[in-house]
Amino acid sequence: METSNPAAPAPSEPRGPRPPRAEGHHYLQYVMAVFVAVLIISNVASSKFVRLGPFSFDGGTILFPISYIFGDILTEVYGYARSRRVIWTGFACTALMAVTLAIVGALPPAEGWQGQAAYISILGQTPRIVLASLVAYFSGEFSNSYVLARMKVLTQGRWLWARTIFSTVVGEGVDSLLFVLIAFYGAQPPDLLRAVIISNYVFKVSLEALATPITYALINRLKRIEREDYYDYDTNFSPFHAG
């Protein structure tokens, strides 16, 4: 059973237990909103392959790594249990989008509307892409959150940079492999899939590493504002635990 463990103080203060917060969080809902929006937009943008310099990747890769930055913020500041609820919220919203797009695509177009072929060409791929994204997102986000939460306890809150980068190395590796194989296997040549997996992984991890100073600033500011720095000492880490 999860307990409301004492929040550790902001990095500028001595470490030690503090009483749990009596009031609600001010910014958790905004972090969750951006997290879910990034996930949904990325799924639609993934319908197109793009090339940027030596990298070939699906369009959603441009935005999707931001979800891992916000995932790090959620787990580091608010703890694994709250992060788990946000991950499930994103999962449900993306599934709703996929079902809606599939129903709209299956319905006969209105007389005189000429966009059906374009709709199917772009958004018709979305259900498979979203299925891939849901599986990859579920596996990758929970891997990322678990690794970060466990490392925070093991390091006693030190070396934030190592936690954010190593958790991303694990989470993005799981995500990139599962997403590309489920979304495009059999529909694209193997050489392209191999290039996309490698490009996705290198691009996402590099972006996370480059964004480390921004992640640090956001995490430290939220810890001060929210008066929260959660340590998952007694947390049930099952993705399916209700709590």
Image (cartoon, rainbow, N blue to C red):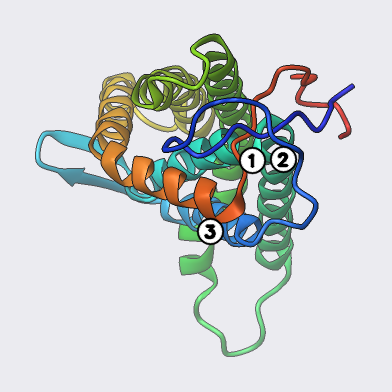
Q: Is residue 122 left or right of residue 25?
A: left
Measuring 40% from the left and 18% from the top, which residue is drawn there? Answer: 166
Task: State the residue at coordinates (49%, 54%).
Answer: 38
Residue 158 x, y percent position in the rendering: 43, 20
At 49% across and 12% down in the image, what residue appears? 155
**Residue at image mark 1:** 78
Pointer 2 residue: 82
Verify CB contact (< 8 Å) between mark 2 and mark 1.
Answer: yes
Q: Helix or strand or loop: what does disc 1 sit on? A: helix
Give the amino acid at mark 1.
Answer: Tyr
Residues 129 and 7: in front is: 7
- Residue 230 appears at what percent x and percent y? 64, 33
Residue type marked 3: Val
Mark 3, secondary structure of its residue: helix
Dot 3 and dot 2 residues touching (CB under 8 Å): no
Looking at the image, do the residues carrying marks 1 and 3 touch, with CB atoms under 8 Å apart?
no
Q: Can you identify the residue that label 3 sits on? A: 34
Residue 178: x and y in percent read 51, 23
How far, Cα to Cα, is label 3 from label 2? 15 Å
- Res. 64 image quadrant: top left
Crowdedness of circle 2 by 10 Å Cα count: few (<14), some, many (20+)?
some
Q: CA distance from mark 1 to mark 3?
A: 16 Å
Give the label, 3 or 2, closer to the camera: 2
Residue 53 visible here:
yes
Camera-side mark, 1 or 3: 1
Instruction: Give the Cα separation between the discs numbered 2 and 1.
Output: 6 Å
Image height check: is 84 above or below 191? below
* Residue type indicated by callout 2: Arg
Image vertical order of residue 87 relative to residue 158, above or below: below
